[in-house]
Image (cartoon, helix red, strand yellow):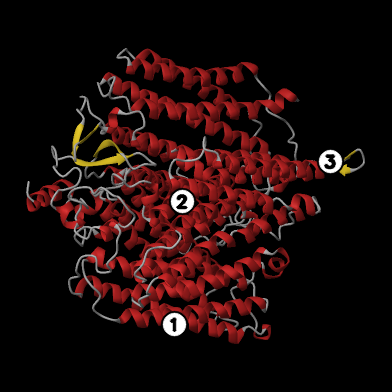
Amino acid sequence: MKDILRILIAPLVWLASFSAVYGLHGLICGHGIGGSVFGLVSVPRLLMGGAYGLAVLLQVGLILALHAARFSSPSPFVRFVSRATAWVGLIASVWTLLPTVVTTYCL
Amino acid sequence: MNTLHRHRRLTEIWSSETGARGLFSTVNHTDLGRMFLAVSFFFFLVGGVLAMLIRAQLATPHSAFAGPEIYNQIFTMHGTIMMFLFAIPTFEGLAMYLLPKMLGTRDLAFPRLSAYGFWCYVFGGMMLLVSMVLGIAPDGGWFMYPPLTGPIYSPGINTDFWLIGITFVEISAIAAAVEITVSILKYRAPGMSLDKMPIFAWYALVTALMILTGFPPLILGSILLELERAFGLPFFQAEFGGDSLLWQHLFWLFGHPEVYIIFLPAAGVISTILPVMCRTTLLGYAWIVASATGLAFLSFGIWVHHMFTTGIPHMGLAFFSAASTLVAVPTGVQLFAWIGTMWKGRPSLRMPMLHLLGFFFTFVIGGLTGVMVAVVPFDWQAHDTAFITAHLHYVLFGGFVFPILAGLYYWMPHVSGRARFFRLGELAFALVFIGFHVTFLAMHWVGLLGQRRRISTYLPEDGWTTVNLISSIGSFVLAIGIAMVIVDLVLHAFTARRSRRDPWQAGTLEWAMMTPPPAYNFASLPHVDSRQPLADDPELTLRLARGEGYLSEPEQGWRESLTVEVATGKPDFHIIYPTNTRLPILMAAVTGVFFVSLLLKFYWTVPLAVVGVTILAWRWAWSLGRTTDLPPRSIGRGLTLPNATQVSRSPSWWGSALLLTANATFFGSLLFGFAFLWTVAPSWPPPAWLTSSAPELALGVIGAGLGVVSIRRAARANRKGQDARPWLGLTFVAALGVAAAAGGVILRAPTPGDHAYGATLLVLGSYALFHALLAALMIAFLTARVVKGFTSPSRQAEFPVVTLWVDYQAGASTLILVVAHLPGLLA
């Protein structure tokens, strides 16, 4: 079962972080959260960007873990597939959450 | 025991009853797979006839062929039948028929569950057909958007048929998904590690997991909408704190993964057949597995691309637009792997290959228009036009019907034991291919000219007349082609000459048996060392028939098989299956009484149906297990295995864990719905919160915790040979405590009909109450089993199953109580 988990973990984390960021976006827009930090960057942008960074970091961590001897599978097949799906998770996180830093958030 | 004697003995043990009686009592996967496929193709024909009626209506302007009311029913039923009664059941039927044979075992994990799912599908499908015959079929479009389908704008029974009938049918999908997942993970030939699984099994596994997590949001949505319609709980009415967009979220959380639930099994068929047609092996097996997995996950992140015109902020649109473009990548990886397979092989243009080429041509176009509508500005122009209808048909017909027709031609010799004799199929393919493209290319065109979907008529001056006529002519050519495919297959089944075994020279295990297949599949179970066991050892079929594999000597008339470790394929348990029974059809019928009672609002029969299902479920579970310890079973080749009743992770545990996964998705969707309404819906906060009650909250939380601890103590007592009953009694009391706390939430919630908040609390409280009572029932069952001697220190498998359910209800109930009481506490 651990091998199935190795294959599924990174896309699962992407799905969770994608949903969480979408939920955070809903909260920010639904409750009118605003303001800025030191007049430099708006609170919503900071929150969204922070969530984006965290999601990407999590995926990087998973890739590193699945390349480490301690966590990778003894089966070469599962090792390959789990690392491939880990890259899917990372690319999906970078691409699908990119709007957090490049588009308007509540228009 | 010689080969013939073994064959006769196994046939005697595994056969269904003869004649029509066998239809109602069979639990054999080959029978049920064929029955599923036969019924799903019947629905395909019904859906096809409805499509012809749509095209007849739209062939000319000012058409008086059908009035708007009937036309609404026709297009709604066409979509509903094709999605719910044809596509998904075809996957279920194909997987049921093929998987045990491909995996080198004798049956699926839970044969009675297969039968129960089949009969739920038949009865649920019949409900929808009856509505159509009576002229009261659903008419709100296959995705049933409120407020159109709410009680104000659709007061009749039409929508109820959809909501209740589809929920009934979805029991079948969930049952099949549990069945398929456990079977693939555990019921494989010894030696078949994950990397040696046939590629179709990987696709089926991914699809089944998607069904388990994709269908619950729709089941929840259907329940909420039916509650609104029947009892006035305003989940989707903005003036009372509801929001009709909640339905769209719940529907498309199911609806978009549904597209991939339909495509991925077909991709499994392609990946299986294409290498055989090209006389080579599949290129990039591991890449394909990774792509299918990635695709499955990505498909859950694109549901909002069906909602681009609902006013969602730009950033939200951009998330889903980005995710929608990304799904093209894993799809492309699979397509290039298939092209590479053709490149390295020697393609042979036999009948299945024609349909595979039809798939390539059609699906690529559908995929590309998919990328077009993933781009928000284009979607704003094309949304709800015939362009979208054409796109989805390119994806679904190209991505499902062509591969399934290829599969039919490929596995027909397996099902019938005959080789094709007549050559109607080639002409039929040409008509289907030409007819399809004429119909739907024209539909793209008329969509870009501005024709809306679902319109019942149009004016000559709209300029759509010629294009619509071309489209309608194409659709009738397509219909003639499909009819010829059916004639060809019927001729094949009844008149063709006998086929030699493995006519395609395939290497997978489903061909390592006589055809048509015997009820037991393999006289002895193979040991697998590669992905192409039959190609590596052409004598395998004969060696298995001679009893040179595992479990070659039937014992005590048992239907026997074995399970393996998930990753390595090392044998771990010995399995004894239940035999033929009418219990599944009976339980499906009583389940049907429950749904029909809700439909007709005969609420006094609902409790009777619930009691009936409970009694039958009790009887179902009671007939398993035994009152004496079984010695380890020698399975041949020097191996002995313990029986599955004597281990902690039995197949029932796996089945429960997967069912709870689906259940958790349902619960998660419910919490999402609550959070969505709270955050997005107008008319919030509600006029009053639930008055918090610390004693009630404490009763529930302590009861939940006590249950978790005491059920473990009961299992421990059983393992040590001590009396488990006192601990079971304590667990029972704990479950009743949780039930009382949940009942408090229900009784004290603000009036549910006044605001969506009260309505949501009612549903959350009912969910907790249902699970607490279910846990109590399971504990009572386990106590009765202990009393009657079905458990012992070694026969322990039932304790972990009940523990799973107790843990789940404890976690879910605690969360519900906190969610219900917290606003009041904070206020």
Q: Residue at x 25, y 80 (%)?
A: B422
Residue lying at the far right of the rendered structure: A39
Chain ID, mark 1: B
In this figure, which residue is indicated by the disc labeled 2?
A: B206
Q: Which residue is mark 1?
A: B477
Position of the C terminus of chain B by quadrant:
top right
List x then y, in percent, for residue B280. Answer: 36, 67
Q: Is residue B610 visible?
A: no
Within 10 Å of the Cα at label 2, are there few (<14), some (14-19), or many (20+) other Cα atoms?
Answer: many
Q: With respect to residue B254, does B668 lie above or below?
A: above
Q: Amino acid at mark 2?
A: Val
User: Outermost residue, bottom direction?
Assistant: B466
Q: Quadrant of residue B514?
A: bottom left
**Whole-percent x, y for residue B340 in the image:** 46, 68
Image coordinates for residue B261, horizontal then vertical, percent: 48, 56
Answer with left or right where residue B388 lies relative to residue B534. right
Residue wearing tag 3: A43
For the residue pair B823 and B516, the one nearer the viewer reads as B516
